[in-house]
Image (cartoon, rainbow, N blue to C red):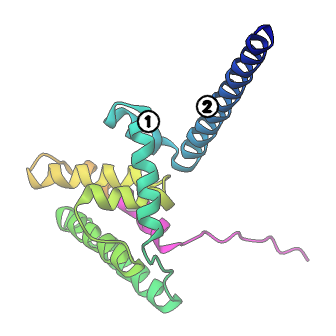
């Protein structure tokens, strides 16, 4: 009978050790997953945690965004198409002094057109922002800021300086979605 008790204690100890190891592995995995999401989403991670009130709920939301965007067919633009969008932006920006309110509306429309052309769904604003945050987390705050100013403008609460800021915010997002990368100028030596 003493042997059975010893074997039982060994078995219980082994189960406890395995449970502890499993718990440690699970906690390590969760921490690593949290770190990956923080790295990928940057400030959007903190904003989502704050908005949803819980890290686990926010992480579930961010993982759901990733899965949803993986199913989308996001495409790059052909160079002529990118040039057309760039020209449209230049024209739009040139009209700001004469019509700042109209330019903000046009900037929003042009960004939406660009997003649609790239393959993003055009549902409500929050869904568009969430989808953009997966591949472009560094600029989604610009989109939210521009949208907030545009909404204030529809209520007559935005001044010209705010409208200018909205256009700047839209431009940052536009450039990112257009995949415009500044070229480095090389110094020519003789």
Q: Is residue 1 visible?
A: yes
Secondary-structure class at tag 1 = helix
- Relative height, residue 113 to residue 26 (above, below): below
The residue sitting at 54% across, 45% down in the picture is 37
The residue under the point 41% across, 61% down is 132
- The residue depicted at 70 percent of the width and 69 percent of the height is 184
- Looking at the picture, how far across and down is residue 171, in whole percent? 40, 63
Question: In 3D space, how far apart are the residues under numbered discs 2 and 1 (Cα atoms)?
Answer: 13 Å
Q: Are marks 2 and 1 in contact (CB under 8 Å)?
A: no
Question: Quarter of the image containing the N terminus?
Answer: top right
Q: Is residue 51 left or right of residue 87?
A: left
Question: Percent position (x, y) of residue 21?
Answer: 71, 28
Quadrant location of residue 96?
A: bottom left
Tag nearer the camera, 2 or 1: 2
Can you say whether 165 is above or below 128 in the image? above
Which image quadrant for residue 10?
A: top right
Disc 1 target residue? 56
- The residue indicated by pointer 2 is 27
């Amino acid at each position: 009978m003493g042997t059975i008790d010893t074997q039982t204690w060994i078995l219980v100890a082994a189960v406890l050790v395995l449970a502890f190891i499993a718990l440690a592995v699970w906690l390590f995995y969760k921490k690593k997953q949290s770190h990956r999401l923080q790295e990928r989403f940057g400030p959007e991670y903190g904003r989502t945690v704050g908005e949803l009130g819980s890290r686990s709920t926010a992480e579930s939301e961010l993982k759901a965004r990733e899965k949803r965007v993986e199913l989308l067919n996001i495409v790059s633009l052909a160079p002529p198409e990118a040039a057309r969008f760039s020209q449209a932006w230049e024209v739009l920006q040139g009209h700001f002094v004469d019509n700042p309110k109209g330019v903000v509306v046009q900037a929003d429309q042009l960004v939406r057109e660009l997003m649609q052309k790239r393959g993003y769904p055009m549902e409500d604003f929050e869904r568009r922002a969430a989808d953009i945050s997966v591949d472009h987390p560094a600029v989604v705050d610009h989109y939210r800021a521009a949208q907030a100013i545009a909404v204030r403008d529809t209520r007559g609460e935005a001044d010209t300086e705010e409208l200018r800021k909205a256009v700047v915010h839209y431009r940052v997002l536009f450039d990112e979605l257009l995949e415009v990368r500044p070229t480095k100028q090389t110094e020519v030596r003789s």
